[in-house]
Image: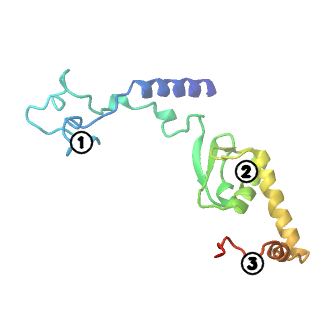
Amino acid sequence: MQRDKDKLLSLRKKMKEKRPSFRRVESWRLIRVKDSWRKPIGIDSQTRKKEKSGVKAPSIGYRTPKKVRHLHPSGYEEIRVETIPDLQGLNPKRHAIKISSKLGARKRITLVNYAQARNFKILNLGISQKEIEGLEAILDSSIEGLEEGEDLFDGLDDLESDIDMGDLGEDEDT
């Protein structure tokens, strides 16, 4: 089964390389005609008649194999995930997850840890495991610092004393 799937994925890749970019007729000549495909309707249109000199038109023959249609190039089904309950009914051998870009760092870290513990492939991790551990350390230290009652503005008094408030780049008239 897996060998068949790999074969179909490589076939899909070859088909994609050969597939022409379907451009609208005369879009390369006229500025007012945009590039996106539109079906030609002219009575003498070579593309509509499917003549050799016409532009290639989309047809069913350019379609990819049905078993690998809508799959990620790695062979997994892509699933967008925002919360941990979204992962509940998924199979790690069949599904790969994309974490929503709406999530912030804290929720993203918990979701990544949960997914990695269940062996899910994460397609848009974007950062390495080392960077994730660094972010976790920063979050933990900032929370511990606030719990101990440290003042965030302790160093501000020292900075003010170091800077001479009267001399901020003003020129003296002599």
Residue flagged by tag 1: what amino acid is it?
Arg
Which of the pair 114/36 is nearer the observer? Answer: 36
Q: Quadrant of the N terminus?
A: top right
Which of the pair 73/104 is nearer the observer? Answer: 104
Alpha carbon distance from label 2 to label 1: 43 Å
Q: Which residue is mark 1?
A: 38
Which residue of the protein is positioned furthest toward the top in this rendering?
52
Residue at 19% across / 30% down in the picture? 47
Residue flagged by tag 2: what amino acid is it?
Ala
- For marks 3 and 2, the one nearer the N-term is 2
Measuring from the top left, give residue 117's x and y in whole percent: 79, 49
In this picture, residue 98 sits left or right of residue 14: right
Q: Residues within 10 Å of mark 1 (few under 14, many from 20)?
A: few
Which residue of the protein is positioned furthest toward the front in this rendering?
174
Residue at 76% across / 49% down in the picture? 131
Alpha carbon distance from label 3 to label 1: 69 Å
In this picture, residue 68 sits left or right of residue 134: left
* Residue 115: mark: 2
Q: Nearer the viewer, mark 3 or mark 2?
A: 3
Residue flagged by tag 3: what amino acid is it?
Met
In the picture shown, does residue 90 fall above or below 4? below
Q: Secondary structure at mark 2?
A: helix
Measuring from the top left, give residue 26's x and y in whole percent: 19, 35
Q: Nearer the viewer, mark 2 or mark 1?
A: 1
Q: Residues within 10 Å of mark 3 (few under 14, many from 20)?
A: few
- For marks 2 and 1, the one nearer the N-term is 1
Residue at 24% across / 37% down in the picture? 24
The quarter of the picture where residue 164 lies is: bottom right
Q: Which residue is mark 3?
A: 165
Alpha carbon distance from label 3 to label 2: 53 Å
Residue at 24% across / 42% down in the picture? 38
